[in-house]
Amino acid sequence: MRACIGLGANLGDGPATLATARDAIAALPRTRLQAFSSLYRSAPIDAGGPDYWNAVALVDTQLTAHTLLDALQRIEQAHGRERPFHHAPRTLDLDLLLYGDERIETPDLVVPHPRLHERAFALLPLAEVWPDAQIPGRGTVQAWLPRVMGQRVEKLP
């Protein structure tokens, strides 16, 4: 199954954290890292704190969506992720953005990510690694990009 994982961090050394998270994702069982986007820097949305570092990992996996989510949450915890309140600053945030063309809605997992189509910091790196990606029930990533271009996001070299 092709899956897209959004990575973000706005506490500590964001680029280093995203690099170690990328390596941890690549090491997941029955999962192969296919692509990793450039790093992007973005302003927090609906939250305070410093700017975020963002990226997207594209993987092929034999893990179920819930098993992959559990593995991602373990990677977050290994990086000191705490959840003191909604939209709190984060040492590492890993979101399962897409899981093939599946639509999943359970108490602990919603795929596609419910705000993916509204977030330039997710759409831009996603379009970089999977330009023809479809957001189930919403259309193509390319169709949504013009709608988020007013958000402050900077692609880093």
Image (cartoon, rainbow, N blue to C red):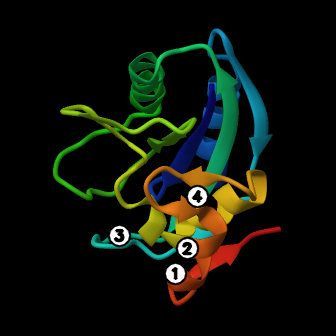
Which numbered marker is on residue 54?
A: 4
Q: Secondary structure at mark 4?
A: strand
Tags 4 and 2 in contact by the CB under 8 Å rule?
no
Dividing the picture into quarters, in which one does residue 63 lie? Answer: top right
Return the x and y of residue 151 as percentages of the image width and height: 50, 84
Residue at image mark 1? 148
Which numbered marker is on residue 144?
A: 2
Q: Earlier in the sequence, mark 3 or mark 1?
A: 3
Marks 2 and 3, how far apart at CA = 27 Å
- Residue extending furthest right? 157
Q: Amino acid at mark 2?
A: Trp
Compared with 116, 151 (above or below) is below
Q: Residue at x 23, y 42 (%)?
A: 83
Return the x and y of residue 141 as percentages of the image width and height: 61, 64
Return the x and y of residue 55 as percentages of the image width and height: 63, 54
- Residue extending furthest top? 29
Position of 57 with respect to 51 (left or right) is right
Marks 4 and 3, how far apart at CA = 15 Å
Q: Secondary structure at mark 2?
A: helix
Name the quadrant of the N terminus: top right
Tags 1 and 2 in contact by the CB under 8 Å rule?
yes
Q: Nearer the viewer, residue 154 or 118?
A: 118
Q: Amino acid at mark 4?
A: Asn
Which numbered marker is on residue 49?
A: 3
Marks 1 and 4, how far apart at CA = 15 Å
Tags 3 and 1 in contact by the CB under 8 Å rule?
no
Q: Earlier in the sequence, mark 2 or mark 3?
A: 3
Mark 4: few, some, or many residues within 10 Å (few <14, many ≥20)? many
Compared with 130, 73 (above or below) is above
